[in-house]
Amino acid sequence: MAAYIASAADDGADTSRGIPRRYAWIVFALTFGLLISDYMSRQVLNAVFPLLKSEWALSDSQLGLLSGIVALMVGLLTFPLSLLADRFGRVKSLVLMAVLWSLATLGCALAENYQQMFIARFLVGVGEAAYGSVGIAVVVAVFPRDMRATLAGAFMAGGMFGSVLGMALGGVMAQYLGWRWAFAGMAFFGLMLALLYPLIVKEARIAPKRAHITPCKIARPLHTLYGSRSVIAAYVASGLQLFVGGTVIVWMPSYLNRYYDMGTDKAGVVAAIIVLCSGIGMILCAMLCDRLGRQRPDRKISLAIAYCLGSCLLLSLAFALPSGTVQLVLICLGMMIAAGTNGPSSAMVANLTHYSVHGTAFATLTLANNLLGLATGPLITGRVSDLIGLHAAFQLVPLISIGAAAVFFIAKRHYHSDMARLEGLQQPAPDAEQIQEVKL
């Protein structure tokens, strides 16, 4: 029986025609730079917690709220703001977002009390809410479709690199210049990129040839956000896998403190190394997906399944071992692979949804990632830890990857038929000349 071999055409619409590769990389660099600024502005607060607590006599709950309000706004506003960006222009929207979060971060530097700081952090969250989803939509639009996993993985890794830079540079600046300059430094970096971005990245230039994709028969492009089993499975599987990665990142400093007797400074450094391994893994695993999936797009899903099962094996083995160097090495390797599903899941979402709603599609993916993984994982693990201890809880966490692998398998079963249906809907409508030829 002959096997069905998918062609590269079975990998979504290519929106990059007519865009010079050099210009595409410039767009990526600037958009990536703003993503780093996004996370630097978000995470610099963590570096100055001790100084704010001392100066304003704040409780841990108040400090936690300053951090949590940003995540709350991102969760609530990602979808509606991404939808507006798809309709009114992604480049313009990205610039407005960057200006808002940068000015709000500057407001943090000027805050005279807790209430003013809270309002500034609220506005940081509003500004950052949709940047990740709209930014990745811009990136995937300017590169060939067979690079989508690589670019998505690299772009999402920018959040981790930005987090590490925000905490590291913020801590150094706060130590030598004071906590206000830590916020101000992040704000000036963001404003500089926000002013440069619209001078180089133009809406007309990033999509000059879109007319070749449609006149389109899709009357309701928003329907593609949830109109196939494969795209729904991609949302769910991505969120479940991030349950594992997000949980390990959040609780790792506490784990190192409790089971390795590390101080907060050393535990933070080791945890940062694990975060960097995760970011590097996102990029390398995504590159492998694009390389092996160039002629067989469904191989990306097969690799996503392998990443889930591989991370489950490595992390389960790591947390079955006693504390020591071998355990830490296995945790780093497991986290590199655990993060590898971000690229292929993002590529699946881009391929299975209409290009005109890609910002909203990635917002939906972000929402699933937060609801099923990044928010739920640390919370549930904390509750389980209260009952049986953090080490025992960590032994259970990797098992969630088995569920993620099962959902990716469902996506693989339906991927080709769902792509064929989307390609059929996106066939150009015949023009008047073609109709006349048929009549003759």
Image (cartoon, rainbow, N blue to C red):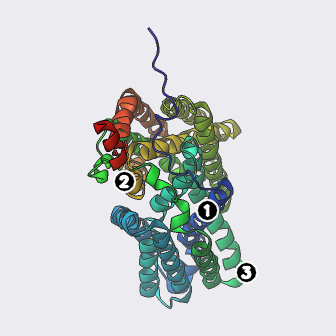
Q: Quadrant of residue 49?
A: bottom right
Q: Label 1 sits on what residue type?
A: Val
Task: Name the residue that disc number 1 marks.
Answer: 27
Whole-angstrom CA distance, mark 3 to mark 1, is: 35 Å
Count the marks: 3
Residue 225 percent location from the top left of the image: 33, 49
With respect to residue 419, does 85 lie above or below? Answer: below
Task: Name the residue that disc number 2 marks.
Answer: 364
Q: Label 3 sits on what residue type?
A: Tyr
Residues at circles 3 and 1 in contact by the CB criterion of under 8 Å: no
Q: Give the farthest residue toward the bottom.
A: 112
Whole-angstrom CA distance, mark 3 to mark 2, is: 41 Å
Which element is circle 3 on? helix
Residue 257 percent location from the top left of the image: 59, 54
Residue at (36, 67) in percent of width and height:
84
| Residue 176 - label | 3
Residue 387 percent location from the top left of the image: 38, 45
Residue in front for this viewpoint, 7 or 40: 7
> Is residue 323 in sight in this rendering?
no
Whole-angstrom CA distance, mark 2 to mark 1, is: 23 Å
Neighbour tally class for label 3: few under 14, some 14-19, many 20 plus, Cα within 10 Å: few
